[in-house]
Amino acid sequence: MSPLDTLVREAASLGGAAPARVIPIQPMTGSEAEVARVLQICNACRYCEGFCAVFPAMTRRLDFAKNDVNFLANLCHNCGACLHACQYAPPHEFAVNVPRAMAEVRLGTYSEYAWPPALGRLYQRNGLTLALALAGGLALFMMLAAALHGGLWGGVEGGNFYAVFPHNLMVALFAPVFLFAVLALGIGVRRFWRSEVPGTASAAAVAEATHDVLRLKYLDGGHGEGCNNADDRFTQARRRFHHLTFYGFLLCFAATSVATLYHYLLDWPAPYGYTTLPKLLGISGGVMLVVGTVGLFWLNLRRHALQQDLRQRPMDRAFIGLLLLTAASGLALMVGKGSAALALLLSVHLGAVMALFATMPYGKFAHGIYRSAALLKWAIEKRQPSRLQLGDD
C-alpha cells in the first residue's frame, strides 16, 4: 500500500459520524456527515485540488462542521470532473462520490433555510407533474375568467391583451406572487449567509464573484474543457445551455421591466411593435430560453447515474419544464396575438408565469441564488489569512 493510500485510509476511517471536532456546532444529518467523510478523504488525496473552488476552499479546513459542509455543497457546480478523475470513486471501498454527496446536501440546505420554514418540505415535492399541474390549474382559472369576461375564443382588435384581462387585474394577481417570491428567497439566502459570515466583502471580492457567476466559470470542469455529463468525456454543452437559459431568463425579465417603465413613466401601454425594445428583448430571451431548457432537459435525461441525486431530479425537471412552458407559450402568444386564439394563449402563458414565480422560492431556481452567495463567500474567504494555525511544535 502506498503512503497516499495509507493516509487516505486513515481519513476514511473517520467514518460518517461528525468528523474531527469533538463537539460540533450543530448536529449533522446523514447526508452532511457523508460529505464530511468524503472531504476528509479528498483533503488527504488532493488530486482534484485545481478543479474548482470547492477543493481550494476545502484545503483551508482540517475538519468539516455543518456550516462548512453546507457552504461547500452550494459552492459545488456538479460538473462531475472530480468523480471521473477520482481513484477512490465507486466501486472502490471508499466510495468517494463528491457530486452526489454535495447534491444531497444542497437539497437539504434549500429546505433548511427556506422561509417560511413550514414550506421547506415543498422542495422535496416539487416534481414535474406537480409543477405542470399547477400551471395547468392556474391557466384553467384564467381561461374561466376570460370566458366570463368576454369570451375565450375570438379576435381582439389590435391584439390588445388588456381587452382580455385589464392591466390592473393582472397587476393585482401577479404583484403579490412576485413580491412574495423575492421576499422568501431574500430571507432564505440571508439565513444561509448568516450561518457563517466569512467577513466583509471588498470591491474586489464582489467583482470576482460577479464575474464567476456571469461566466458560469466552474462549469468548465476546472480545466476549461467543460463538464462530464453522460460519461468521462468532457463537453461544453451543459455550460452553453445554462448560459442560454440564464441570459434568456434575464432578457425576458428585462423585457417585462422595460414594458413596465413604458406603461407608468411614458404612458405607453402594450401592445408594442416588433421593433420596440420590450419586444426585441422578449423575443430574443424567449428563443434563448426554449433552446437552453430543451438542451438542459436532454442532458438531464443522459446524466451519468453516479452524478445524480434521484430525489432532486424531479425538482430539476420541474424547473426546466416550467421555464420551457413559460418561454414557449410567450412566443406562441406573440405569433398568435392577432388570431382568435389570443385569450386562450394568454391564459396558458399567464398560468405558466404565475406557477413559475409561485414555486420559485421552493424549486430549483433557488440553486442559482445560493450558489451566487457561496461564490461571494469564497471570494471573501480566499482573500483572508488561513484559519489553520499550523506551526512547528
Image (tube, helix red, strand yellow):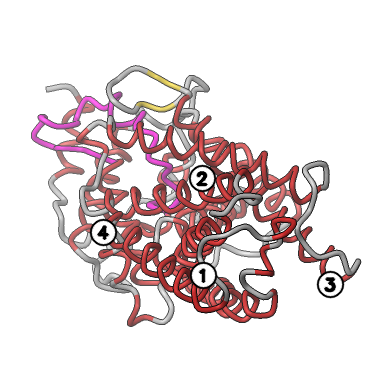
User: Which residue is the extreme one toward the top?
Assistant: 233
Q: Nearer the viewer, mark 2 or mark 4?
A: 2
Compared to 69, does 40 lie above or below? above
State the residue in front, 82 or 276. Answer: 276
Alpha carbon separation for disc pair 4 and 1: 23 Å
Between discs 2 and 3, the one toward the N terminus: 3
Judge the density around disc 3: few (<14), some (14-19), many (≥20) Cα neighbours within 10 Å: few
Between discs 4 and 1, the one toward the N terminus: 4
State the residue in front, 194 or 12. Answer: 194
Between discs 2 and 4, the one toward the N terminus: 4
Alpha carbon separation for disc pair 4 and 3: 49 Å
Say what amino acid the circle numbered 4 marks. Glu
Q: Look at 54% across and 47% down and name the residue there.
A: 327
Between discs 1 and 3, the one toward the N terminus: 1
Numbered disc 3: secondary structure: helix
Is 83 inside the magenta-drawn segment?
yes
Say what amino acid the circle numbered 1 marks. Leu
Alpha carbon separation for disc pair 1 and 3: 27 Å
Q: Are dots 1 and 3 in contact, CB under 8 Å?
A: no
- 125 relative position to 223: left or right: left
Q: Look at 30% across and 54% down and name the residue there.
A: 128
Q: Where is residue 284? Give x, y as percent.
A: 67, 39
Q: Look at 21% across and 62% down and name the residue there.
A: 18
- For disc 1, the marked residue is 185
Is 86 inside the magenta-drawn segment?
yes
- For disc 2, the marked residue is 328
Q: Where is residue 121? Give x, y as percent.
A: 28, 72
- For disc 4, the marked residue is 32
- For disc 3, the marked residue is 264
Alpha carbon separation for disc pair 2 and 1: 26 Å
Q: Residue 73: in sight, yes or no?
A: yes
